[in-house]
Amino acid sequence: MTEEIVSSDQHLLELRDRIDEIDGNIARLISERAECALKVAEVKKATGEDALYYRPEREAQVLRKAMERNQGPLTDEEMARLFREIMSACLALEEPVKVAYLGPEGTFTQQAALKHFGHSAQSRPLAVIDEVFREVEAGAANYGVVPVENSTEGVINHTLDNFMTSNLKICGEVELRIHHHLMISDITRPDAITRIYSHAQSLAQCRKWLDSHYPNVERVAVASNAEAAKRVKGEWNAAAIAGDMAADLYGLKMLAEKIEDRPDNSTRFLIVGTQAVPASSDDKTSLMVSMRNEPGALHDLLEPFRRHNVDLTRVETRPSQSGNWTYVFFIDFKGHRDTPDVAAALKEVGACASDMKVLGSYPRGVL
Ligand SMILES: C=C(O[C@@H]1C=C(C(=O)O)C=C[C@H]1O)C(=O)O
């Protein structure tokens, strides 16, 4: 018995010694990698004032390689997440990247910003989507993160409409699985809830769950689900629907977890900036087009994509801001604008459109 304990203790010590040794090696290699990144910064600086330190296409390639190389036991996603943070720290050594996101703190957009840029980025919450665009246009932030579509509730019109007046480009996308929880504060009486706060989108994504569990409770739409979490702090008869980050931030208790109606509920976010991103070999392009209001216009618009084998991933229509009953199409497709098939399709669409703007070619979301 005692002998067994001694030998398992001994085994544990040996394994921990081995882990210490491996950690030493990892630390040395990470430092070596960071030295390399600093040298890359010098090369970039030599290109002049407007040197671009953050390179979305290269980061996507590094993450994809981390996943391809992985042989377990960690999952590919877990491995990529670790590399995400290493790169984030290396980039911060070159030049800390400044990111504006649709706040306040604790929103899913903040979670998306962290997922895309890692924790070494300097991030700043802004109150509305327009402000995120303005902050990047003014150069106060290098990039902005805004939601663009939800798998249950559809498009976020405000984001699309901003592209009609803004010159910003899309530099990346990030997808996030959205889990909503019903949460309460220390003073809330669970049996006396008369009001549930959340963002309108989140209330809509949990509509069926609310209908069956809280059919007679008032649903109050507020500016964000972080704001909902904040309000619940001081109310004994209210609950909020929000995500994990908001619960942590405001120290709330979960009353029911993962209450979204669809288990695959996810939101896609865009990274907006001023740079044109080179091809990463697995890219998407977003396009904004207006057509003359005549028969067959939509067919003429889509036909070149079919002919050049370009795979459309999304088509949205928004009323144009220049006249009644005229429309702007937002089209996403696979491929980079510099590749021959995409370039040929774009040229033909441009010839029949009354107006066309390529919003950006960017790496497909990796994580
Ligand atoms: C090191 C570079 O700069 C940044 C940091 C990267 C990294 O740590 O791998 C990758 C791309 C850039 O955002 C580079 O451009 O290669």
Image (tube, rainbow, N blue to C red):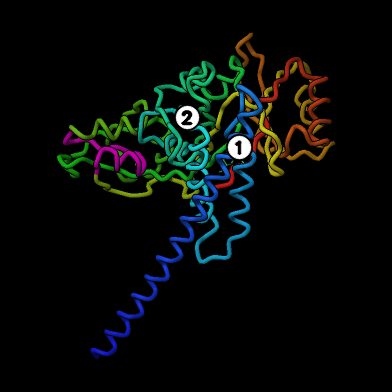
Pinpoint residue 154: horizontal percent, then vertical percent.
53, 34
Q: Which label number is shown at residue 99?
A: 2
Residue at image x 73%, y 16%?
A: 355
Up the image or down, 134 lies above or below 283; here it is above
Pinpoint residue 333: horizontal percent, then vertical percent.
70, 36
* Numbered range of the magenta stretch: 235-252
Specify whether tag 1 is near ligand 1 (CB below 8 Å): yes
Residue at image x 69%, y 41%?
A: 280
Pinpoint residue 16: horizontal percent, then vertical percent.
37, 70
Residue type at mark 2? Val
Is residue 152 in sight in this rendering? no
**153 with respect to 220 (left or right):** right
Q: Quadrant of the N terminus?
A: bottom left
Asked which secondary structure carries label 1, the reply is helix
Number of residues whose C-alpha sits closer than 10 Å to that of mark 2, classed few (under 14), some (14–19) or many (20 or more): many
Residue indicated by mark 1 = 56
